[in-house]
Amino acid sequence: MAINKQHAIDPDKCTACTICVTACPVTAATRKFRGPKMTGPALTRLRKLVSDDDPMLDYCSNCKTCDLVCPSGVPISTLNMIAKNEYYKTHPRKSKADDMLAHSEKMGKLITSLPLGSTFANMGMSIGKAFNVMGAMGIAQSAKMPAYASESFISKFKKIKQNPYLRKVVFFSGCYINYNQPEVGVDLVKVYQKNKIEVAIDENFVCCGSPMVAGGYIDDARVNAAKNAALLKSWVDRGYDIVTACTSCGLMLKQEYQELFDFAGMAEYAAHMYDSIEYLAKLNDAGEFDTNFVNDNTKYIYHAPCHLKVQAIGRPSMELLPLIPGIDIEEADAGCCGISGSYGFKADKHEIAMKVGSKLFNRIKNSHAELGVCECGTCRLQMENGSGVKAIHPLTVLRKAYGL
Amino acid sequence: MLKTTVVVIGGGATGVGILRDLSMRGVDAILVERDDLGYWTSSRFHGLLHSGGRYAVKDKEAAKECIQENTILRRIGRHCVEATESLFVRAPEDSEEFEQEWVKSCGECGISAIPISMDEAFKLEPNLSRKLLSAYRCPGAAIDGFRLLWQTVASANKYGGKAMTYKEVTAIETENGTVVGVKIRDKWTGVEDKIACDFVISAAGSFAGEVAHMAGLTVNVKPSKGTLIAFNHRICNRVVHRLHKSSDADIFVPHGSITILGTTSIDSAPDDTSTETAEVKAMLEIGKITFEEIYDYRILRVFAGTRPLYSADPNAKGRSASRGFVALDHAHDGIKHFMSVCGGKFTTYRLMAEKVCNIVCEQLGVNEKCHTAEENLVDDPSPELMNRAKAVFPSYGAELASSRLGNEKLERVIKHIETDPEMKELVCECENVTLAEIDEIAAEPTSHTVSDVRRRTRLGMGTCQGTFCAYRSVGAINKENMPWAKDSVDLLKDFLETRWKGIRPVLWGNMLRDIELTRAIYDAALNLSGVEDIK
Ligand SMILES: Cc1cc2nc3c(=O)[nH]c(=O)nc-3n(C[C@H](O)[C@H](O)[C@H](O)COP(=O)(O)OP(=O)(O)OC[C@H]3O[C@@H](n4cnc5c(N)ncnc54)[C@H](O)[C@@H]3O)c2cc1C
Ligand code: SF4
Ligand code: SF4
Ligand code: SF4
């Protein structure tokens, strides 16, 4: 397997300082997990020597908090994901949910292609829950699953009339926006048009592969990565910048591909990749961001997703949203929400996920905010699930402030 | 005063091999070692179970002995041997004629050397330099020195053989030109004692000259120092040799969790285990031909051992046995029942012992033949025991602990964790060593320092080189019944100092960052350097 040697399998940089262990939200939530230092660099050395049962690997949620704090630049979570992938080549999976959650795009495609598919699917989830079908599949009984939209983003996008502008971006929507929350994609197009940006999409993009990697299906992710990387490179060659509105997709395309795989052109396109709000914040720095907002007197609380933090791009949402007149927004600064993509949906991990997120949930509840704000779709779901407060994408806030 | 038939001086490979051989033939024997088992050359070596390939062209006799003993040790010592196989690879700077001669010689010596395509070689060992030209698979392997010594002694114990550590032989006593006993002194207590015996075999390795001197004799040992570099992880999964005329720094041996590159050869004093940065740099330059990215790999430490080379003294009589080693019967020098054995290889330790014991037994009138090739050093753990081990050890721990401990201790350790689950906590996270193992080994009568515990458990041998496990293990060792463990400060200092000795010459890159952390913990937080004033 052509794993990128430079980044991936080298445990040499770790000084065993244990800082990552103190920061890992899962280690704090359960004694069953020995933490990033062990599962990552320490055991990487031993895995080259002996093979053994390694139930620990399943506990890492790939939230990447460890990578963020490591003073030695060890790609800890990637070491974990590679080990997990290797492990499941020779060990049976414990849960049937793994496959389904890792291949969310397959589900999305299937459901939205059927007439009324989403209605039945969403119903199915609640009916299924009543009969414990989900439980049998290894999905947590009390986890609120993402609902499917009746029309995909791609289909909605085609109906939007855009003005042509010189500044052009290609929008990698990702599965969650395409199948579950297409309105966020529409928000992006509206907000970008307002800022004189033309938005393109590419129907040949496939799922970024983030849930596949987290589920231990790196080989499947590699196929997707090869496809996406080539497409992204060709868009950049044509003068486009790339934006994502899901921080996990963004991280995956920009950084994790390079840690895991070795395809040509990745560094080139990665230099032109932006989170959707980061891109606008860049315009703002250049004095080109449109600030003709209407008043918004809502009280918001913003949660920065782990996969945004690890991109080291600051908090672009906390730069832009406060520009809206009347707005009351504060940052939660309460760590990981616990969901980590698909992790929190798994029956044996749900409790851990809720425990990890409890600090955030309490913070949201005590803030008396009317709405939560967050770039990541599954984080928003978890915020709602844990605190009862609805959460929206910052693009949605901007669109409303533009009166669009 | 103790009494036995044969006293063996030296607890390296040679000595323990002789102890086991004699014991299995029913000869009463005691081995006396001045330090810990394997403290000198038998742990400061490359850890390669030779296939013989390295010697095939130059010394066919030695090559044949190697492949014969390699086959035997893979069987009887399987818990000490990692049967990795080896690759011989030729680089552009190596001669093609030599390759042809080598292939022919391997055939003549009965060493299998299977040619493979470079594509296949790169698949097997992805880190190999893409400039290499040809590759052969041979039956080389890695062998764990400490483990082999302890298991050989365990096997001898079953037949009544005894080994004493930290007992130095200070005199060899003779009466009428015949050996009658040795004087010994306990290294820790200074207490002196005597062992009466009929025969003394000196297997003191590089120190053979000094031991012979005690009896007023001369044995010309010319120790030759070799330096070895330990890398933090397995760069390769097979032993990798350069296919050329044997030379410096041309072998990589994957060893447990690490890789060892070696070696060099310079005349030295028997106890010279010093290493220098210049040597390391020169070795890396050569190693780079085999593994291009060698400078990216983190070096854990360097160490050195001395080969007990016998310098052929034209006047010495009674030289016998193989070309690789000498067994000198000092009857020719005027002292009966005293032999010195030196030279040879770790790989052929069993064969050397067999040859020496044949001579000794003949003189003692013992007719029993050698059985050492027929019986395994230790029994395999039963599947039940391994299942229990898997249930209590953390992942990757059961197999490692089982081969480190041997059955009896493994069972005790398992029981300990079963009754007190806290004991499964890891003291050394780098090498996966549990509290229960530390407890077990520390309580052994042969343990006197944390380093003794380290040699038997691999505690502190991983990435952090003791940074975290030093204070943990010192804290964990049950001080109550162990007089040696009373002074925590001394234990810490001694342990860290031995670790640092190997790190100083390679203090750069990731290791330097690691050591800064160690300094922060021990010097800043624990004030280990300042504590003397307080004491
Ligand atoms: C750098 C290097 C790499 C090597 N690599 C390999 C390899 O890969 N494969 C291989 O097969 N061989 C290898 N060898 C050779 C092999 O290591 C040695 O031949 C072998 O270990 C020698 O064992 P020994 O028992 O003779 O000596 P030692 O292990 O040195 O044992 C002698 C013992 O005698 C004790 N002693 C001395 N004086 C007294 C006294 N007065 N009282 C009590 N005890 C005393 C010492 O404390 C010592 O422990 C290597 C050697 C070197 C130096
Ligand atoms: S990725 Fe997150 S859960 Fe996994 S080890 Fe790192 S911090 Fe812990
Ligand atoms: S992975 Fe990084 S943070 Fe964790 S112990 Fe190693 S050096 Fe420290
Ligand atoms: S991470 Fe992004 S593309 Fe990828 S599954 Fe989420 S939504 Fe799909």
Image: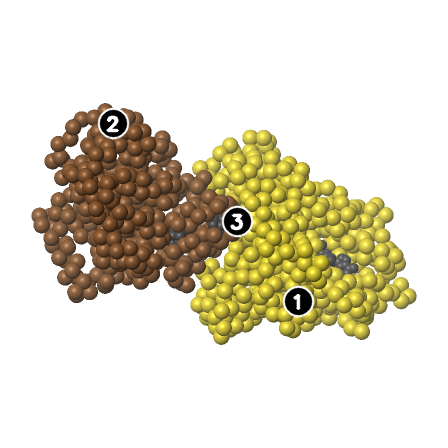
Q: Is residue B507 left or right of residue A345?
A: right
The kind of residue tagged 3 is Thr
Q: Are marks 1 and 3 in contact (CB under 8 Å)?
A: no
Tell me which corner region of the image, top left, top right, bottom left or bottom right, holds residue B527. bottom right
Q: Is residue B292 above or below residue A391?
A: above
Label 3 sits on residue? A15
Q: Residue at x 55, y 30 (%)?
A: B92
Does mark 2 have its CB less than 8 Å from ligand 4?
no
The local crowd at label 3, few if under 14, some if 14 to 19, many if 20 or more residues have their Cα within 10 Å, is many
Chain A colour as displayed: brown
Residue B106 visible within the image: no
Chain that is coloured yellow in the picture: B
C-alpha gap between disc 2 and disc 1: 73 Å
Pick whichever, B56 or B259, lies toward us.
Answer: B259
- Is the N terminus of chain B in the top left, top right, bottom left or bottom right quadrant? bottom right
Q: Is residue A393 left or right of residue B313?
A: left
The kind of residue tagged 2 is Arg
Q: Is residue A285 left or right of residue B273?
A: left
Q: Are marks 3 and 2 in contact (CB under 8 Å)?
A: no
Q: Residue at x 36, y 45 (%)?
A: A309
Q: Is residue B137 above or below residue B346?
A: above
Q: Chain of mark 1?
A: B
Kindly state the secondary structure of the residue where label 3 is placed: loop
Label 1 sits on residue? B485
Q: Are marks 3 and 2 on the same chain?
A: yes
Does mark 3 have its CB less than 8 Å from ligand 3?
yes
C-alpha gap between disc 1 and disc 3: 28 Å
C-alpha gap between disc 3 and disc 2: 45 Å
Label 2 sits on residue? A167
Residue A380 position in % (x across, y down):
25, 51
Residue A343 position in % (x across, y down):
31, 55
Q: Are marks 2 and 1 on the same chain?
A: no
